[in-house]
Amino acid sequence: MKSVAPTRYAENRKARFEYEVLETFQGGLVLQGQEVKSIRTGGAKLDGSYLAISRGELWLIGAHIRKYAKTNNTEDYDPNQNRKVLVHKKELAYLGEKIQEKGLTLVPFSLYPSGNRIKVSFSVCRGRKTHDKREMLKNRDLERELQRNL
């Protein structure tokens, strides 16, 4: 019997509630071998992470990838280190312009497999106000009740 790989290794579910998605992108992650193994075994968390442009490169900041349990030499491993995200130059320039606008940020939503590589799905987002969140919850509850009644 063959095991089926998950469609997503890690998701940032709370981000969909906290932010309004404007545009979605994807990029490759630069990882060490042990980090890839750890992500594939479910050792990654994207809660509270974001993307930023520094020194002309895109970086994933605040993502937690725990050390792989079966690795010996991990004394100096930092699970919260910044990781480089690979995107095309045109996309990087476009993203740089977008995050200069007031209220926009880059938020990672998921880590997923693409062949032998691990990619990150991220979006240009705008933060939601409290009243928008309440309205969204109210609409969701109304839809659930309608579905139950039908």
Image: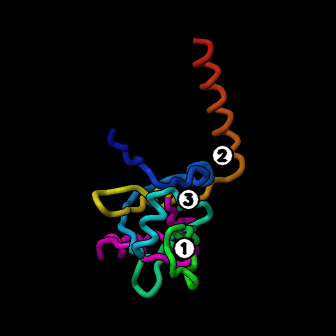
Image spot of residue 138 (x, y percent): 68, 33
Image spot of residue 114 (x, y percent): 31, 57
Mark 2: few/some/many CA within 10 Å (<14, 14-19, 20+): some
Judging by the rendered image, the residue that carries numbered circle 3 is: 126
Please indicate, yes or no, whether residue 100 appears anywhere in the rendered image.
no
Q: Are marks 3 and 2 in contact (CB under 8 Å)?
A: no
Q: Which stretch is magenta? A: 79-108
Q: Which badge, 1 or 3, is on the more N-terminal residue?
A: 1
Q: Residue at x 48, y 64 (%)?
A: 38
Which structural element holds mark 3? Answer: strand
Judging by the rendered image, the residue that carries numbered circle 1 is: 61
| Residue 102 drawn in magenta | yes
Q: Residue at x 52, y 62 (%)?
A: 107
Q: Are marks 1 and 2 in contact (CB under 8 Å)?
A: no
Q: Residue at x 46, y 54 (%)?
A: 9
- The amino acid type, in three-letter code, at marker 2 is Asp
Judging by the rendered image, the residue that carries numbered circle 2 is: 132
From what the image shows, is residue 30 above or below residue 109? Answer: below
Q: Measure how far apart labels 3 and 2 are at the Cα level.
A: 12 Å
Please indicate, yes or no, whether residue 36 appears anywhere in the rendered image.
yes
Image spot of residue 128 (x, y percent): 63, 53
- The amino acid type, in three-letter code, at marker 3 is Arg
The quadrant of the picture occupied by the N terminus is: top left
The quadrant of the picture occupied by the C terminus is: top right
Residue situated in front as seen by the camera: 149 or 31: 31
Say which of marks 1 and 3 sits in front: 1
